[in-house]
Image: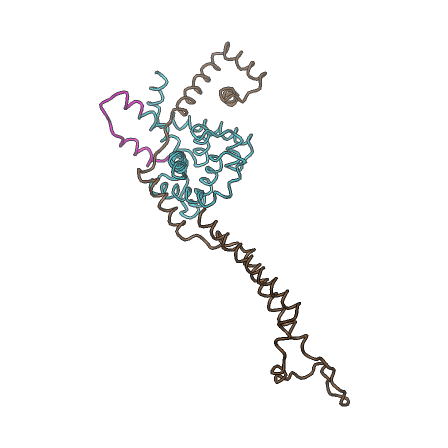
Amino acid sequence: MFAHLVQRYQQYVFTLVMRFTDNREDAEEISQDVFVKTYRSLADFRGDAKFSTWLYTVVRTSCITFLRKKKLATTSMDNERTLSQLENRESGFNANTIEQKSKHAMVNAAIRLLSPDDGQLITLFYKGEQSLEEIGRIMSLDPNTVKVKLHRARHRLKEKMEKYFSYEVQDIQSD
Amino acid sequence: MEDRLWDYIDGHSSPTERSAIEELLATNREWQQKHAELLNLQQLLNSSELEAPSMRFTKNVMEEIARYQVAPATKTYVNKNIIRGIGAFFITMILGVLTFMFTQFKWRSGAGSGGGSLNLPVEKLRLDRLENLNYSKVFNSTYIIVFLLIAVIAGFMMLDMYLQQKRKAHTA
């Protein structure tokens, strides 16, 4: 039964972890650790919040612990490594597929340019189906603070996209 | 302007605020442009894809979990209260036997032999007295029999409780 939970939430957990590290191997290791910790402390889940909220709290504490151990730098504003990854993306023959992939790749790359907190906040709100109160619980913040941080994160994301992906942004806006 | 528009798009605005913004959107070009811009971003974020781990991820997780299940801690299947109960039972048994033994000895205060010497209130133990002890009298005593009966029944009850606990832990 726990395998079903893993399959259901693995992408969410992995995406959240990727907001803290660009290394896929590290992200898989952390994600695996999150699910093992969750399994071992299932008895501690009191049911006073959604299971996903509790799971994402474990994700956050695991990521912070990992970062402290590895002493990784947070993603900076000018992440040239991310830009070079984009330049190397494969081109295909199906124009619609390319367009779709470009858009998703661009958004994910732009989110990775944000700080881990901003990236996690946006992912929890848009993909994690978490309310402001639930995000506040995960990040140990007041819901009003979460709202303000979310606004700022979106503003910074927009700036990143205009700065590094201006061509793609114009393309999308003209659709 | 942006914060107000985001509140409006997210549905967090109060009814009064919502009406005010709708009025602005109907009349103000700047607000209309900004609203369209933010809606575009909203749409992009809503349609963004999640990142996927490797195909073996679930299997790796379950293998890791299986390693923990092979050797569970004893505290998960042994109830400490039962262990304490069994311990208390044996201690009570031992104390009961010791108490009975001590009640069989004759305690006599020693005669005073002058200043400076310590008179022990206890008669020196004479082990040869044990040979003359009437064991049948001891074990035929009603109190001893009742005590032993209660101790044996209590012992069996505690053993049964312990085994049931162990059986439940194995079936769980």
x, y (%) of residue A33?
40, 44
Q: Which chain is cyan?
A: A
Quadrant of the image occupied by residue B107: bottom right
Instruction: Report if residue B11 lies within the magenta region.
Output: no
Vertical side of A16 occupied by A71: above or below: below
Which of the 4 quarters of the picture holds residue A5? top left
- The span picked out in magenta is A78-100
Q: Position of residue B30 (x, y in %)?
A: 47, 14
Residue nearer the viewer, B16 or B68: B68
Q: Report whether A21 appears left or right of B159.
A: left
Which chain is represented by brown in the image? B
Query: Residue at image x 48%, y 39%?
Result: A57
> Residue A67 occupies which quadrant of the picture?
top left
Q: Residue furthest top?
A: B27
Residue at the limit of the structure toward the bottom, as seen here: B114
Find residue A60 and report its horizontal and vertical position in percent. 46, 40
Position of A3 compared to B116: left or right?
Answer: left
At 51% across and 23% down in the image, what residue appears?
B3
Instruction: Give the camera-side residue of B118 and A94.
Output: B118
Front position in the image: B82 or A1 = B82
